[in-house]
Amino acid sequence: MSSSKNGPSRPAPPPPNTNNQAAKPSGYGRFIPREELSSFAAWNLGSLDGAAPTDKGVQRPAPPEPEAPSQEQVLAEATRAARTAGYQDGYRDGLVALEGFKQSFASQVTAQLGTVTQSYMEQLDALQQQMARALAVSATHLARQMVRSEIAQRPELVVAVAEEAVETLLLSARHITLRVNPDDVALVSQGAADVLAARGARVVSDASVLRGGCLVESDIGVIDASVETRWRRAAASIGCDESWKEAPLPAGTTEDEDTDA
């Protein structure tokens, strides 16, 4: 191809598409993926003199200053704060007072229960002592009746009492005298003859000595084996001081009526 006088020659245009197919888009007109970009930067419009553009940024107006609270608002806020503080203080003081009341109430109840328990125990002990006393008195009354009946039905029992009383004396005792009731003289003289002869004792009738008992006298002392003394010792062993002699009955009352009562 030869060049033209008016300038360089231009390439001839491509031939028309004879196959009626749509022309394929150019590679420079497609979307470029991010993976294919190595670096990029934002473009800003520069000044006409070629100087670098200045970044002034976005200009926003300054926020308005808050208005000063009014006197009513300040007073209302102070009142609210005072009420809140007062409520908290009152609630705390109330809890402290409640705890103190509970402790005081518990102490009072404990003391009252202790007093009631102590009083109950004292009354129970007194009742038990009264019951024991009444039982002991009843037992001594019954035993006294049984002993009297036994002495009346078996008068020979005085022989064993006399022998035991004489044998209680020391072997060195001299001038032994056995005092018995006049109704028991014959029984003791016959039943305890061997013991009396061995100790050189003599039997003396004494009306002041009740049947069933005796008194032994010697140069070294006296042994009281009377019914009253032996009964008093037996009653004392069970905590009772009932004497052998019964208390006199009230005027106009018979023994049968008193027993029934």
Image (cartoon, rainbow, N blue to C red):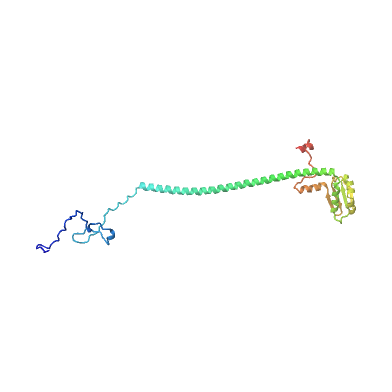
Q: Residue furthest left?
A: 5
Q: Residue furthest bottom?
A: 2
Left or right, residue 130 beside residue 100 = right
Q: Residue furthest front?
A: 19
Q: Position of residue 143 (x, y in %)?
A: 78, 44
Q: Position of residue 63 (x, y in %)?
A: 30, 52
Left or right, residue 252 beside residue 116 = right
Q: Residue furthest top?
A: 252
Q: Inspect this view and state whether residue 109 appears.
A: yes
What residue sits 73% from the left and 44% below the top?
Answer: 135
Task: Compare residues 195 and 49 and report the one nearer the observer.
Answer: 49
Task: Locate residue 243: give its quadrant.
Answer: top right
Q: Position of residue 127 (x, y in %)?
A: 69, 44
Task: Compare residues 183 and 98 and report the one nearer the observer.
Answer: 183
Q: Position of residue 40 (x, y in %)?
A: 26, 60
Query: Considering the image in quadrants, where does the C terminus appear?
Result: top right
Left or right, residue 76 beside residue 230 = left
Rendered position, 52 above or below 214:
below
What residue sits 78% from the left and 48% below the top?
Answer: 234
Query: Considering the image in quadrants, where does the N terminus appear?
Result: bottom left
